[in-house]
Amino acid sequence: MNVSEISELLERDKSTIYREIKRGMVEFRNSDWSVRKEYSAYYSLNIRGQLMSKTGRKLFYEKDSLLLSYIQSKLDEKYSPDAISGELRHQGISTISTQTI
């Protein structure tokens, strides 16, 4: 089965199929140490998972270390999360929820 047939069967563009094959191509060694290339769905899925884990929205503390240190200092001063959230909201600094704090 060639790439065109696979793309029609799966209703995907040919470039998507080529990219998937490229991502999942693995070199195996035979007993005589010759190399053969095969597609491995498991390997491809693992690589895709690693790439996808790098995407997405960053958490607030990854973006704003100053805000994190401010919240930490207020918690050390025994402020409640509600009080910290309310103060930040009142000052227009952040709309972070009490659950997040």
Image (tube, rainbow, N blue to C red):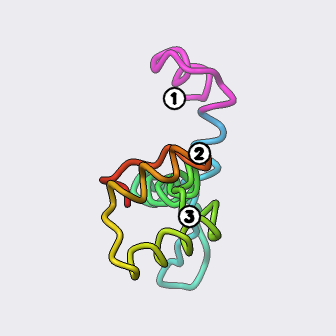
Residue 2 magenta: yes
| Quadrant assignment, res 75 | bottom left
Give amino acid for label 1.
Answer: Met
Residue range corresponding to the magenta coloring: 1-16
Residue picked out by circle 3 = 26
At 61% across and 43% down in the image, what residue appears?
92
Residue 93 versus residue 80 in the image, above or below? above
Instruction: Specify few, some or many for label 1: CA neighbours under 10 Å numbering under 14, 14-19, or 20 or more.
Output: few
20 relative to 49 in the view: left or right: right
N-term mark: 2 or 3: 2
27 relative to 72 in the view: left or right: right
At 59% across and 64% down in the image, what residue appears?
67
N-term mark: 3 or 1: 1
Residue 52 magenta: no
Give amino acid for label 3.
Answer: Val
In terms of secondary structure, where does tag 1 sit?
loop
Q: CA distance from mark 3 to mark 1?
A: 19 Å
Q: Nearer the viewer, residue 34 or 96?
A: 96
Q: Nearer the viewer, residue 75 or 51?
A: 75
Q: Nearer the viewer, residue 23 or 81?
A: 81
Observer-side mark, 3 or 1, equals 3
Q: Quadrant of the C terminus?
A: bottom left
Residue picked out by circle 1 = 1
Residue picked out by circle 2 = 21
Q: CA distance from mark 2 to mark 3?
A: 10 Å
User: Looking at the picture, how far across and down is residue 27, in whole percent?
Assistant: 58, 69
Residue 95 versus residue 45 in the image, above or below? above
